[in-house]
Amino acid sequence: MILFVEIIIGIVLFTFLVVPNVLKAPLNCIGDYPPEIRKRCVKLGLIEDSKKRFSKKEIVKKGIACIVMPLILALIMYRINGANSFIDGFVESFIIWLAITWYDAIVLDCLWFCHSKKVQIPGTEDMPEYKDYLFHIKQSFICTALGVPVCLIVGLCVTLFSSVS
């Protein structure tokens, strides 16, 4: 039951972090858009031509999140869930990671992003890539894989917390 509540809280927090940013300034989230839409934005002069998918600022933000999140997750797993081993910390945090990742893929990306005109960037509205479900599913597999090292760190932190106590 605790894990389910944590998943719901994680989904709500994730939604409040992502949706307002995309609605307010879709170009700030352009790294998460399909490649053809990014290319059109370059052609229209809306963004700079860059070989990099994410700006330095986005990489720093995501990097900080990948450092802070495992620590927060580890504390939650240890204090609230009672996890006291590497396996407990890893498995429980990975379940939460998977739930949020696939919520993002199915609900936010495939159901909302692929069908909302509010996320469309002016000059790209005609592009079929807005309904590229496969792009979002592939990205979710990548995000799932990225969760492994994050959750390994959570497991290690839980082990350290347990050994210190």
Image: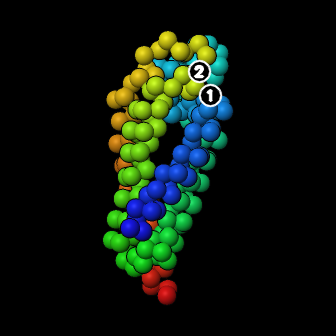
Tell me the residue at 59%/46% (across/down): 17
- Residue 114, x across and y down, in percent: 44, 27
Labelled pair 2, 1 in contact (Cβ < 8 Å):
yes
**Left or right of residue 22, residue 73 in this image:** left
- Residue 60, x across and y down, in percent: 61, 47
2 or 1: mark nearer the eye: 2
The answer to whether residue 163 is seen in the rendering is yes
Instruction: Identify the amino acid type marked 1.
Output: Leu
Q: Which residue is mark 2?
A: 121
- Residue 75, x across and y down, in percent: 52, 72
Q: Which residue is mark 1?
A: 27
Foreground of the two, 30 or 5: 5
Tell me the residue at 51%/26% (across/down): 116
**Left or right of residue 19, residue 74 in this image:** left
Quarter of the rendering containing residue 93: bottom left
Quarter of the rendering containing residue 20: top right
- Mark pair 2, 1: CA separation: 7 Å
Instruction: Identify the amino acid type marked 2.
Output: Ile
Foreground of the two, 141 or 99: 99
